[in-house]
Amino acid sequence: MKKHLILVSSVFFLSCSPLLANGEESSSQLTNNENKVAQVSDEKSAKADQNSTSTSSTDNKKGESSAKKTNDATETTVEKEIKTDTVKEEQNKQNVAKRSLPKEVQGEWVTTLKNGKKRELIITNNKYIFDGTEYSILDYNVENNEYMLSWDDEAYIKKYGKQDFWNPQPLSFSYNSNKDSIQIGDDNYTRKETTNPNEDYYDEYAIDQDFPGFLQDRWVTSFEGKTLSITIGPRSFILNDTEEYKINSYAKKGNTYVLDWDVDEFISKYGEDSVFNPQPIMFDYNQTDDTIISGAYSLVYRREAKTTTSTTNTSSTNNNVSNNSSANSANSLPKTGENFSFTLLFIGSMMTVLGSSILIKKFK
């Protein structure tokens, strides 16, 4: 029985061995297939990644190319704008160079407003700076000392922006060459005393220097029965012995002198009224007859020493005339007295004779 069981078992194992071998082969093939599939999948994934990288690289190149073109276009536009602005500036400079403002109006000017504040005006060959606002001058016209200035509104907008109510108008002012002053509306501008005015305009200009010696004197004149005086010191100008002006500088044009005085020092001394409007002191000196002409009525002032000498000479002449008259009177009075005495003596004698005769008759 045992032999039959062993035999049956051996047959069973022999019959199953091919199946086991085939199973191992199938499993091995299955594993190989799975590996191949995984390899193919990896290769496809790698190709996909490569294609994606390639596409991304292409897109990046396209983006860089597009950005480069945009930058180039932007740079070209900016360069064109810069070139345009440069050309405009050069044209403006050429225009300004052709029509520079005259030297006589160039300088720093100042006025005092009714509220006591000062306002400044600066004029150069191509700039007009009014109370801090700058205008670039392109051209100007002059008629009867009235200036009309055309200015660059684009440069103004670029610097200050466009105003709400934008209506550009020409700048205007009048220049008085005799007084060397600028009039804008009701305000009169004089050269700023701290700056050196145009030396080409004046024959002589001096800052912090004494007046010429021949001007330093006391000058007098008569007006409506009153004596008016001007006293000129080394650096002072005293009017009618009441108001003293400290002179900072003076200028000379021909026979005309223009004096800039210390406004602050004057106010500290005498105060300031509601109509205070400081102006430079001006007068003419006539060397021929040694006189000063000044004031709204062009009064003629003479040296007090000469006036006193003239008065003394006049008084001396009058005294001589009076003395001569007295001498003549003295010479004539004795004659007149003698004639009168003889008359009285004659009348007295007659009365004496008559009286004597009357007395003699009474005694008889």
Image: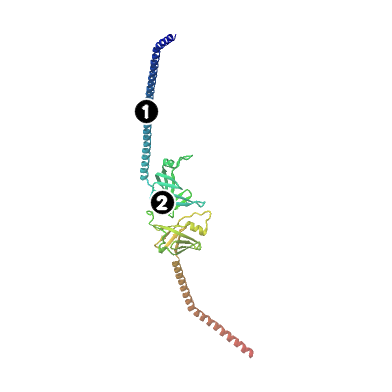
Q: Which of 32 and 152 is in front in this view?
A: 32
Rendering coords of residue 15 (x, y %): 40, 10
* Residue 87 image label: none
**Placement of 122 over or under 87, stated as above or below:** below
Image spot of residue 104 (x, y percent): 39, 51
Residue of label 1: 57
Residue labelled with disc 2: 107
**Residue 201, quarter of picture:** bottom left
x then y, percent, for residue 63: 38, 29
User: Could you say which is closer to the camera, residue 239 or residue 159?
Assistant: 159
- Depth order, front residue of 209/62: 62
Which of the 4 image quarters holds residue 195?
Answer: bottom left
Residue 257 in view (yes/no): no
363 w.r.t. 42: above or below = below
**Residue 89 in sight here:** yes
**Residue at mark 1 to residue at mark 2: CA–CA distance:** 67 Å
